[in-house]
Image (spheres, helix red, strand yellow):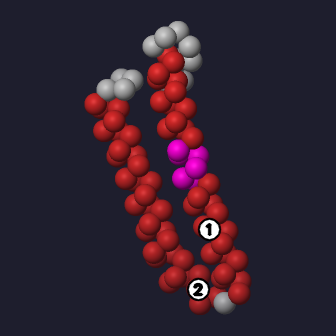
Amino acid sequence: MCFSLSMVEMLLIWLVIIIAVFAIIKLLLIPMVLAPMGAAGSVIIQVVNIILWVIVAIAVIYIVFDLLGCLMGGFGGLGRVR
């Protein structure tokens, strides 16, 4: 399944899901729930933003290493871990 059309399809689906979850949390959770808390809400908002960016970074790293493993697996290098 390395570098095939189905792999690109799954990659795009995962990217859309990650972006949608990120946007929903930023639109709903932060302004409606945490903003009325004042200063404590501001700190919580920053923590939530950091956690969201960490999740996005981990997803990107996973995708990049999956692509590298796929690329090198065909040449006798890294194999796929699944």
Residue, disc 1: 48
Residue at the image position 52 percent from the left and 27 percent from the top:
68
Q: In terms of image quadrants, where is residue 5? A: top left
Q: Is residue 72 above or below residue 47?
A: above
Quick one: quadrant of the N terminus?
top left
Q: How far apart are marks 2 and 1 (CA)?
A: 12 Å
Q: Residues within 10 Å of mark 1 (few under 14, many from 20)?
A: some
Residue at the image position 51 percent from the left and 75 percent from the top:
29
Q: Is residue 42 above or below residue 67?
A: below
x, y percent for residue 76: 53, 9
Q: In this view, does 29 lie above or below 11?
A: below
Residue, disc 2: 35
Q: How crowded is mark 2: few (under 14 residues within 10 Å), some or many (20 or more)?
A: some
SS for callout 2: helix
Q: In terms of image quadrants, where is residue 6? A: top left
SS for callout 1: helix
What amino acid type is highlighted by mark number 1? Val
What amino acid type is highlighted by mark number 2? Ala
Residue at the image position 31 percent from the left and 38 percent from the top:
9
Q: Is the magenta stretch mostly helix, strand or loop?
A: helix
Q: Which residue lies furthest to the top in this view?
A: 76
The numbered mark, 2 or 1, whose residue comes first in the sequence reads 2
**In this orientation, which residue lies closer to the viewer: 27 or 75?**
75
Does residue 78 show up magenta in the picture? no
x, y percent for residue 79: 53, 17
x, y percent for residue 50: 64, 63
Q: In this view, does 38 lie to the left or right of 27?
A: right
Q: Is residue 8 left or right of residue 43?
A: left
Q: What stretch is highlighted in magenta?
A: 55-60
Q: In this view, does 80 lie above or below 75?
A: below
Q: In this view, does 35 lie to the left or right of 15?
A: right
x, y percent for residue 78: 56, 18
